[in-house]
Image (spheres, rainbow, N blue to C red):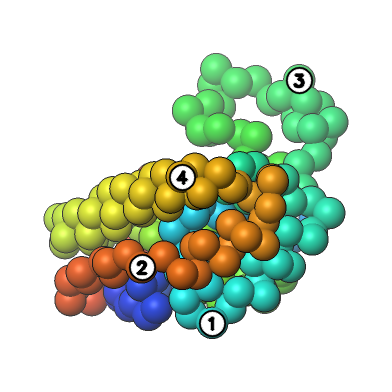
Amino acid sequence: MDKLEYEFCSNVPVYKCSFCGKCSSFIESTSYTSIKTRGCCWYFPKYSLIDMKNIIDSGNKNFIYSLLNMDNAEIYQYCINVNGEFNKKEYEEYLKETFQEDSEVSDFDQKLFFRLCPFATTKGCSIAFDLRPHPCNLYLCREVINSCGKDYKEFSKERKDYYSYCNYYSDTLKYILMDNTVDLTKDPFKAIDILEKTEIPTFEFKNLKPIIFNADLSY
Ligand code: SF4
Ligand code: SF4
Protein backbone atom coordinates (compact mmCIF):
# COMPACT_ATOMS: atom_id res chain seq x y z
CA MET A 1 0.00 0.00 0.00
CA ASP A 2 1.15 3.53 -0.75
CA LYS A 3 -0.06 6.95 0.30
CA LEU A 4 -0.66 10.29 -1.39
CA GLU A 5 -0.81 13.21 1.02
CA TYR A 6 -1.36 16.93 0.67
CA GLU A 7 0.53 19.57 2.61
CA PHE A 8 1.02 23.32 2.30
CA CYS A 9 3.31 25.90 3.80
CA SER A 10 4.18 29.55 2.90
CA ASN A 11 1.36 29.65 0.30
CA VAL A 12 2.92 26.64 -1.46
CA PRO A 13 1.11 23.29 -1.72
CA VAL A 14 2.82 19.95 -2.28
CA TYR A 15 1.68 16.41 -3.03
CA LYS A 16 3.72 13.86 -1.12
CA CYS A 17 3.58 10.43 -2.69
CA SER A 18 5.21 7.47 -0.97
CA PHE A 19 5.52 5.64 -4.28
CA CYS A 20 7.93 8.21 -5.76
CA GLY A 21 11.39 6.70 -5.89
CA LYS A 22 10.00 3.17 -6.47
CA CYS A 23 9.00 3.79 -10.07
CA SER A 24 11.95 2.55 -12.11
CA SER A 25 9.66 0.54 -14.43
CA PHE A 26 7.49 3.51 -15.46
CA ILE A 27 7.74 5.00 -18.94
CA GLU A 28 8.00 8.44 -17.41
CA SER A 29 10.90 7.56 -15.18
CA THR A 30 12.91 6.08 -18.06
CA SER A 31 16.18 7.96 -17.94
CA TYR A 32 19.05 7.89 -20.41
CA THR A 33 20.67 10.74 -18.51
CA SER A 34 23.50 10.75 -15.98
CA ILE A 35 20.98 9.97 -13.18
CA LYS A 36 19.13 6.73 -13.81
CA THR A 37 16.86 7.20 -10.80
CA ARG A 38 15.61 10.68 -11.66
CA GLY A 39 11.89 9.67 -11.58
CA CYS A 40 9.97 12.33 -13.52
CA CYS A 41 12.47 15.15 -12.86
CA TRP A 42 12.90 15.80 -16.57
CA TYR A 43 11.35 19.24 -16.11
CA PHE A 44 13.40 22.41 -16.64
CA PRO A 45 12.18 24.70 -13.84
CA LYS A 46 10.30 27.81 -14.86
CA TYR A 47 9.83 30.37 -12.09
CA SER A 48 6.78 32.55 -12.64
CA LEU A 49 6.23 35.81 -10.75
CA ILE A 50 3.96 34.13 -8.20
CA ASP A 51 6.62 31.47 -7.54
CA MET A 52 9.14 34.26 -6.92
CA LYS A 53 6.69 36.13 -4.71
CA ASN A 54 6.12 33.00 -2.59
CA ILE A 55 9.87 32.41 -2.30
CA ILE A 56 10.48 36.03 -1.26
CA ASP A 57 7.64 35.90 1.29
CA SER A 58 9.05 32.72 2.81
CA GLY A 59 12.26 34.63 3.61
CA ASN A 60 14.33 33.16 0.76
CA LYS A 61 14.93 36.21 -1.42
CA ASN A 62 18.61 35.21 -1.76
CA PHE A 63 17.51 32.11 -3.65
CA ILE A 64 16.06 34.36 -6.40
CA TYR A 65 19.37 36.24 -6.55
CA SER A 66 21.19 32.90 -6.90
CA LEU A 67 18.87 31.94 -9.79
CA LEU A 68 19.72 35.22 -11.54
CA ASN A 69 23.41 34.31 -11.30
CA MET A 70 23.16 30.75 -12.57
CA ASP A 71 24.96 30.18 -15.90
CA ASN A 72 22.11 27.96 -17.09
CA ALA A 73 19.35 30.45 -16.20
CA GLU A 74 17.50 32.39 -18.86
CA ILE A 75 16.10 35.65 -17.54
CA TYR A 76 12.94 36.88 -19.21
CA GLN A 77 10.90 39.98 -18.40
CA TYR A 78 8.50 38.13 -16.11
CA CYS A 79 9.97 34.70 -15.46
CA ILE A 80 13.22 32.83 -14.98
CA ASN A 81 13.85 29.50 -16.73
CA VAL A 82 16.60 27.21 -15.48
CA ASN A 83 17.90 24.86 -18.15
CA GLY A 84 18.98 21.34 -17.40
CA GLU A 85 20.72 18.58 -19.32
CA PHE A 86 19.42 17.43 -22.71
CA ASN A 87 21.51 15.11 -24.85
CA LYS A 88 20.19 15.91 -28.33
CA LYS A 89 22.70 13.73 -30.14
CA GLU A 90 21.82 10.62 -28.12
CA TYR A 91 18.13 11.39 -28.56
CA GLU A 92 18.50 11.57 -32.33
CA GLU A 93 20.46 8.30 -32.36
CA TYR A 94 17.75 6.68 -30.25
CA LEU A 95 15.01 7.82 -32.67
CA LYS A 96 16.90 6.28 -35.58
CA GLU A 97 17.33 2.99 -33.74
CA THR A 98 13.84 2.64 -32.25
CA PHE A 99 11.01 1.49 -34.46
CA GLN A 100 8.38 4.00 -33.35
CA GLU A 101 5.12 2.59 -34.73
CA ASP A 102 5.28 -0.62 -32.70
CA SER A 103 6.90 0.95 -29.72
CA GLU A 104 4.89 0.87 -26.46
CA VAL A 105 6.18 4.37 -25.79
CA SER A 106 5.16 5.88 -29.14
CA ASP A 107 2.46 8.06 -27.51
CA PHE A 108 4.96 9.50 -25.05
CA ASP A 109 7.30 12.43 -25.65
CA GLN A 110 10.51 10.40 -25.67
CA LYS A 111 12.69 13.50 -25.60
CA LEU A 112 11.98 13.43 -21.89
CA PHE A 113 14.06 10.24 -21.53
CA PHE A 114 17.09 12.42 -22.29
CA ARG A 115 16.27 15.40 -20.09
CA LEU A 116 17.39 16.06 -16.54
CA CYS A 117 16.48 18.94 -14.23
CA PRO A 118 19.54 20.84 -12.96
CA PHE A 119 18.36 20.43 -9.36
CA ALA A 120 18.01 16.63 -9.59
CA THR A 121 20.53 14.49 -7.70
CA THR A 122 20.89 10.77 -7.09
CA LYS A 123 19.13 11.41 -3.75
CA GLY A 124 16.21 13.34 -5.25
CA CYS A 125 15.55 17.05 -5.55
CA SER A 126 18.30 19.19 -4.03
CA ILE A 127 16.04 22.14 -3.14
CA ALA A 128 13.27 22.42 -0.54
CA PHE A 129 9.72 22.23 -1.85
CA ASP A 130 9.02 25.91 -1.17
CA LEU A 131 11.92 26.85 -3.49
CA ARG A 132 10.57 24.88 -6.44
CA PRO A 133 8.26 26.26 -9.13
CA HIS A 134 4.69 25.17 -8.41
CA PRO A 135 4.37 22.58 -11.26
CA CYS A 136 7.05 20.48 -9.52
CA ASN A 137 5.08 20.17 -6.31
CA LEU A 138 1.76 19.17 -7.84
CA TYR A 139 2.92 16.86 -10.60
CA LEU A 140 2.06 13.16 -10.55
CA CYS A 141 2.59 10.62 -13.31
CA ARG A 142 -0.37 8.89 -14.94
CA GLU A 143 0.48 5.62 -13.15
CA VAL A 144 0.02 7.19 -9.72
CA ILE A 145 -3.07 9.15 -10.81
CA ASN A 146 -4.69 6.04 -12.28
CA SER A 147 -3.81 4.00 -9.20
CA CYS A 148 -5.56 6.57 -6.96
CA GLY A 149 -8.78 6.13 -8.97
CA LYS A 150 -11.77 8.34 -8.23
CA ASP A 151 -10.27 9.52 -4.94
CA TYR A 152 -7.88 11.64 -7.01
CA LYS A 153 -10.76 13.89 -8.12
CA GLU A 154 -10.44 16.28 -5.17
CA PHE A 155 -6.65 16.45 -5.62
CA SER A 156 -7.13 17.22 -9.29
CA LYS A 157 -9.59 20.00 -8.47
CA GLU A 158 -7.25 21.52 -5.91
CA ARG A 159 -4.40 21.41 -8.42
CA LYS A 160 -6.49 23.19 -11.05
CA ASP A 161 -7.60 25.82 -8.51
CA TYR A 162 -4.02 26.49 -7.45
CA TYR A 163 -2.88 26.75 -11.09
CA SER A 164 -5.66 29.29 -11.74
CA TYR A 165 -4.60 31.24 -8.66
CA CYS A 166 -0.97 31.22 -9.87
CA ASN A 167 -1.90 32.35 -13.38
CA TYR A 168 -4.12 35.12 -12.10
CA TYR A 169 -1.62 36.53 -9.60
CA SER A 170 1.38 36.13 -11.93
CA ASP A 171 -0.56 38.36 -14.35
CA THR A 172 -1.44 40.78 -11.56
CA LEU A 173 2.22 41.05 -10.56
CA LYS A 174 3.23 41.48 -14.20
CA TYR A 175 0.87 44.45 -14.58
CA ILE A 176 2.22 45.97 -11.36
CA LEU A 177 5.79 45.70 -12.74
CA MET A 178 4.61 47.18 -16.06
CA ASP A 179 3.02 50.14 -14.24
CA ASN A 180 6.41 50.71 -12.64
CA THR A 181 8.19 50.34 -16.04
CA VAL A 182 10.43 47.65 -14.63
CA ASP A 183 11.01 43.95 -15.35
CA LEU A 184 13.51 41.22 -14.54
CA THR A 185 15.71 42.01 -17.55
CA LYS A 186 15.82 45.80 -17.03
CA ASP A 187 16.36 45.92 -13.27
CA PRO A 188 15.94 42.61 -11.44
CA PHE A 189 16.70 44.11 -8.02
CA LYS A 190 13.98 46.74 -8.34
CA ALA A 191 11.57 44.14 -9.74
CA ILE A 192 12.24 41.85 -6.76
CA ASP A 193 11.82 44.79 -4.39
CA ILE A 194 8.41 45.57 -5.92
CA LEU A 195 7.36 41.90 -5.69
CA GLU A 196 8.35 41.95 -2.03
CA LYS A 197 6.35 45.10 -1.23
CA THR A 198 3.21 44.08 -3.12
CA GLU A 199 0.54 42.39 -1.05
CA ILE A 200 -1.59 39.69 -2.60
CA PRO A 201 -4.16 37.38 -1.01
CA THR A 202 -2.95 33.90 -0.19
CA PHE A 203 -4.58 30.78 -1.64
CA GLU A 204 -7.34 29.14 0.37
CA PHE A 205 -6.15 25.58 0.75
CA LYS A 206 -8.53 22.69 1.30
CA ASN A 207 -7.83 19.94 3.75
CA LEU A 208 -7.62 16.85 1.59
CA LYS A 209 -7.72 13.43 3.16
CA PRO A 210 -4.74 11.21 2.25
CA ILE A 211 -5.36 8.58 -0.43
CA ILE A 212 -4.20 5.04 0.23
CA PHE A 213 -3.56 3.20 -3.01
CA ASN A 214 -2.02 0.11 -4.52
CA ALA A 215 0.27 1.10 -7.36
CA ASP A 216 -1.13 -0.35 -10.58
CA LEU A 217 1.86 -0.92 -12.81
CA SER A 218 -0.10 -1.96 -15.89
CA TYR A 219 -0.27 1.50 -17.51
S1 SF4 B 1 5.23 10.96 -9.93
FE1 SF4 B 1 5.43 8.90 -10.81
S2 SF4 B 1 7.22 8.96 -12.19
FE2 SF4 B 1 7.28 10.77 -10.85
S3 SF4 B 1 8.64 10.14 -9.16
FE3 SF4 B 1 6.49 9.78 -8.52
S4 SF4 B 1 6.07 7.64 -9.05
FE4 SF4 B 1 7.93 8.27 -10.19
S1 SF4 C 1 13.18 21.30 -9.15
FE1 SF4 C 1 13.33 19.41 -7.98
S2 SF4 C 1 11.26 18.52 -8.06
FE2 SF4 C 1 11.40 20.05 -9.72
S3 SF4 C 1 12.00 18.87 -11.52
FE3 SF4 C 1 13.85 19.69 -10.55
S4 SF4 C 1 14.60 18.04 -9.20
FE4 SF4 C 1 12.46 17.59 -9.73
**Could you tell me which secondary element the residue under label 1 belongs to?**
loop
Direction top: furthest residue: 101
**Could you tell me which secondary element the residue under label 4 belongs to?**
helix
| Left or right for 148, reference 105 | left
Q: Earlier in the sequence, mark 1 or mark 2?
A: 1
Against 12, residue 138 (above or below) is above
Residue at mark 3 to residue at mark 1: CA–CA distance: 49 Å
Q: Give the quarter of the image for residue 219.
A: top left
Q: Amino acid at mark 1?
A: Gly
Residue named by callout 2: 199
Residue at mark 4 to residue at mark 1: CA–CA distance: 25 Å
Q: Earlier in the sequence, mark 3 or mark 4?
A: 3
Q: Earlier in the sequence, mark 4 or mark 1?
A: 1
For disc 4, the neighbor class at 10 Å (few under 14, some 14 to 19, many from 20) is few
Q: What number is the disc on residue 96?
A: 3
Q: Nearer the viewer, mark 3 or mark 4?
A: 4
Q: Nearer the viewer, mark 4 or mark 2?
A: 4
Q: Earlier in the sequence, mark 2 or mark 3?
A: 3
**Could you tell me which secondary element the residue under label 3 belongs to?**
helix
Residue named by callout 4: 179
Q: Give the quarter of the image for residue 98.
A: top right
Q: Residue at x 39, y 78 (%)?
A: 10
Q: Residue at x 27, y 67 (%)?
A: 201
Q: Residue at x 23, y 76 (%)?
A: 210
Residue at mark 4 to residue at mark 2: CA–CA distance: 16 Å
**Could you tell me which secondary element the residue under label 2 belongs to?**
loop
Residue named by callout 1: 59
Q: Residue 62: x percent and y percent?
A: 67, 75
Q: Nearer the viewer, mark 1 or mark 2?
A: 2
Q: Is mark 4 within 8 Å of ligand 2?
A: no
